[in-house]
Image: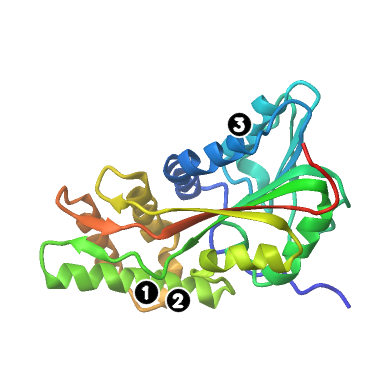
């Protein structure tokens, strides 16, 4: 039986909005993702795969770490925003449909990818099989079930921001995603057969200068059509952007989970 047709991606690449999204995402989450990889000992000679590499900041960092003798393959369904370089190759890959080599990588990393993939439960075991024995899988995802506004000008502004969050979650679910999947990642990695599962979580306060809030503002434009489908109007989205520019606005971030586990059967790097 042929695999199902790929779903329309919630976030695409190759547009001004997508490039701004990559910049905000990297500024918000690289300070969590990259130290986790560094602490795992990524270094010369490692062979690494990134799923859903987006703007490429993780892949570029890995490419510097694995020289000499290592390699990084940065993949995305639409890799147009990725640039190859020393130790760094780029390929188009739909992780839900395309084959992966067996026992090929010392490290596989996927950030904010699998929560958008309806078949994530079957993708995870394939990622595990693509690891060498002892290899490391790092999955970074969010749980957006709790990210409330904390300081707003009035009750109407608070409700507007909450409506935006609900519409965004509904849009993700309509595309087969799970905006709360971050909390399920540790158990999912263990169920996929990984050992030494290690969990780090991060939560912060969003404000006008915070790249995480910049990412939210980007979503009002990048996801405009989907948000309108969920009942928001352009005038409301404009007011959400104005609210997020308010110097006094504060909101809790979603919980960002960075979870690592190792494939059994070897010592790894």
Label located before the other in sequence (1 or 3): 3
- Name the residue: 59% across, 46% down: 54
Rendered position, 118 above or below 31: below
- Place of residue 256 in the rendered image (x, y in percent of width and height, measured from the top left): 46, 56
In the picture, the disc for residue 170 is 2
Most distant residue in the left direction: 154
Label located before the other in sequence (3 or 2): 3
CA distance for labels 1 and 2: 6 Å
- Place of residue 27 in the rendered image (x, y in percent of width and height, measured from the top left): 43, 40
In the drawing, does residue 207 fall left or right of residue 223? left
- Place of residue 212 in the rendered image (x, y in percent of width and height, measured from the top left): 37, 49
Nearer to us of marks 3 and 2 is: 3
Q: Are marks 1 and 2 in contact (CB under 8 Å)?
A: yes
Circle 2 crowding by C-alpha within 10 Å: few under 14, some 14–19, many from 20: some
In the picture, the disc for residue 166 is 1
Circle 3 crowding by C-alpha within 10 Å: few under 14, some 14–19, many from 20: some
In the picture, the disc for residue 61 is 3
Snapshot quadrant of residue 121: bottom right
């Amino acid at each position: 039986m042929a695999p199902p047709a790929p779903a329309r991606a919630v976030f695409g690449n190759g547009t001004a909005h997508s490039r701004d999204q990559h910049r905000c995402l990297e500024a918000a989450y690289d300070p969590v993702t990259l130290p986790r990889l560094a602490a795992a000992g990524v270094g010369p000679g490692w062979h690494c795969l990134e799923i859903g590499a987006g703007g490429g900041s993780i892949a570029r960092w890995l490419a510097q770490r694995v020289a000499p003798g290592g390699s990084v393959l940065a993949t995305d369904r639409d890799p147009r925003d990725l640039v190859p370089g020393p130790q760094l190759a780029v390929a188009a890959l739909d992780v839900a449909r395309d084959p992966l080599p067996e026992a090929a990588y010392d490290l596989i990393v996927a950030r904010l990818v699998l929560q958008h993939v309806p078949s994530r439960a079957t993708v995870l075991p394939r990622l595990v099989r693509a690891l060498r024995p002892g290899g490391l899988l790092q999955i970074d995802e969010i749980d957006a079930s709790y990210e409330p506004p904390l300081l707003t000008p009035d009750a109407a502004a608070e409700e507007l921001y909450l409506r935006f969050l609900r519409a965004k979650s509904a849009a993700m679910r309509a595309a087969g995603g799970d905006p709360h999947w971050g909390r399920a990642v540790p158990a999912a990695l263990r169920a996929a057969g990984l050992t030494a599962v290690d969990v780090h979580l991060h939560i912060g306060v969003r404000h006008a200068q915070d790249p995480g809030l910049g990412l939210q503002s980007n979503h009002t434009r990048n996801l405009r059509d989907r948000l309108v489908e969920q009942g928001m109007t352009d005038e409301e989205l404009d007011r959400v952007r104005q609210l997020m520019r308010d110097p006094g606005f504060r909101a809790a971030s979603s919980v960002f989970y960075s979870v690592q586990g190792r494939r059994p059967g070897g010592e790894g790097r």
